[in-house]
Amino acid sequence: MAQFSVNPQRFDPYLNFKFRVKWDGKYVAGISKAGALKRTTEVVPHREGGDPSSNRKSPGRTEYEAITLERGVTHDPEFEKWVNKVWNFGSGLGAEVSIKDFRKDIIIEMYNEAGQLVIAYKFYRCWVSEYQALPELDANANAVAIQSIKLENGDGKSDYAVAEPGEISYTEALIMRPLAAAELLSVWENCIHKSLLDKSLNLLAAACAIPDLEDVAKLSIGERDARLLQLREWLFGSQLKNVAHCPLCSEKVEWENDTSTFRLQTYKSDLPTSKVFQLDLSDYQIKFRLLNSADMKRAMSDRAYSEQPSKLLTECIVELNGNETAVLERAEELPQETFELMSKQMEKEDPQSNILLQMNCPACQHSWTTSFDIQSYLWAEIDNWAKHILREVYLLARAFGWSEQDILNMKPIRRQLYLEMIGL
Ligand SMILES: [Zn+2]
C-alpha cells in the first residue's frame, strides 16, 4: 500500500502536535501531551539439550504499556472525576470504588495540519493507576503547572473506520456546508441589530467557515446571491412562496416558484473577485471587476454615491486604455453611455445579481416584472424559524428537562414527534 493512497501528492508523514482525546463520548479539554502507545511482548528463551549455546526465542506475554495523559492544571474536573471512580477517599465503606464504571474506553485521535481526522486509536477498559494532581511547585520556574493521569489498558487497536481523508486545498475553505440549527440560531442572535447586508455576510461566513467578513464581502453580488439561494434550499427546501401587489389595482398576487428557476449561476469554489472583464469600445478599452457587497456597503453609507451614480462603477475599473485620439486621464470623464454598457456587461457576467420575476395580475390582467431579493426573503424566513424553534426548545425543555443544545441537535421530525407527545 502506498503511504498516502488518497492523497498521493502528500510527501510528509503526519506531525505529532494535533490530537484530541475522547472518553464517555466527549473530548477531554486541554490535553497537551499523550504518552507513547506501546506494547511489548516478552521474550521466552529456550534451549534444547543438543543446541549450540545461543537461545531460541519465543513470544510470551504481550503487555500494553500505560498511557500517560498530561494537561495544564485548570478547574475542569474530568481527571479527578475518573480518578475518584477508582478509589474515592472518604466516601464510606462499600462506596470507595465505582466498580461498574471505573474502566472507560478511550479514543486518541490524530489530525493533519488542516485539522482533518486522519488516525484514531481505541483503548479498551482503561483505568487510572496514577494521578498527579499538582506538579512540583517552584517559585523560580517558568512553566505551566501540569497534572497527569496514567492509564492501564488491556488492549488497544487502530480504528480502521477512520480512513485517510481527502486533503483540502485553500480555496475549498469557500465551499459551503449546511448550517446546523444551533449555528444558525447563533448567527441570527448575533445579527439581530445588523443591516440586512451584514446579516447575509455573517450567514455566508458561517456556512463557508470564513473568519473574515471582509473576504465574504468581496464575493460578487451574483456569487453571493447564488450562495444564499443554495443555503435557502438546504435550510428550508426549494419551494419559494410570496405575495406581491399589482401596481395598477393593488390586488394581492400570490406566487410560487422553485429555487431552480431562480438559479442563474452556480456558485464557484474560488474567489471570483480577482477576475477582470473587458469592455472594448472604438476609442478605448476598459478592464473592470464585478460589483461586490463591500461596494454596496460603501455606497449605502456615503451620500456621494447617490449624488453621482457612476462613482460606484468608476471604482470597479481596474485599467483604462485609450488610443491616441481619445486619451482619457480619469475614469470619471467617461461618458454616461459607457457606464451603461459596462453595467449591462456586469449583469451578463454576474446574472444572479438581478433576479427578475414576471408577474401577472389575475384581476386586471396587468403584467409587470419585479425583482426578487433573496437576502430579505431568506432573512425573513430565518427570523420566523428562530422564533419558532425557540418556542419548541422552551416547550420541550419544560416538559422533559432536556438542554437547549440537545433539543437543537434533534432533527425537526423528532422535535415534532415529542411535541405531539405532550399534546402540542
Ligand atoms: Zn391588477
Image (cartoon, rainbow, N blue to C red):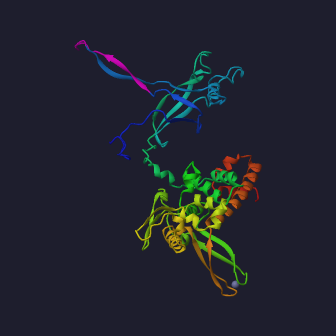
Q: In which quarter of the image is residue 256?
A: bottom right
Q: Is residue 50 left or right of residue 15?
A: left
Can residue 93 be found in the magenta stretch? no
Picture quarter with the N terminus: top left
Picture coordinates of residue 54 (x, y %)? Answer: 26, 14
Q: Quadrant of residue 50?
A: top left
Q: How many labels does the image show?
A: 0
Q: Which residue lies furthest to the front in this view?
A: 325
**Closest to the observer, 390 or 421:** 390
**Closest to the observer, 74 or 286:** 286
Picture coordinates of residue 366 (x, y %)? Answer: 66, 86
Can residue 49 be found in the magenta stretch? yes
Residue at the image position 59 percent from the left and 24 percent from the top: 144
Q: Can residue 378 be seen in this view?
A: no
Where 328 sits versus 365, above or below? above
Q: Which residue lies furthest to the bottom in this view?
A: 364
Q: Is residue 401 left or right of residue 87?
A: right
Residue at the image position 55 percent from the left and 50 percent from the top: 210
Span colored in magenta: 38-53
Residue at the image position 51 percent from the left and 32 percent from the top: 124
Rendered-image quarter of ligand 1: bottom right
Picture coordinates of residue 301 (x, y %)? Answer: 66, 59
Where 323 sits versus 386, above or below? below
Picture quarter with the C terminus: bottom right
Q: Can residue 384 be seen in this view?
A: yes
Picture coordinates of residue 292 (x, y %)? Answer: 56, 61
**Closest to the observer, 352 or 149:** 352
Where 324 sits versus 293, above or below? below
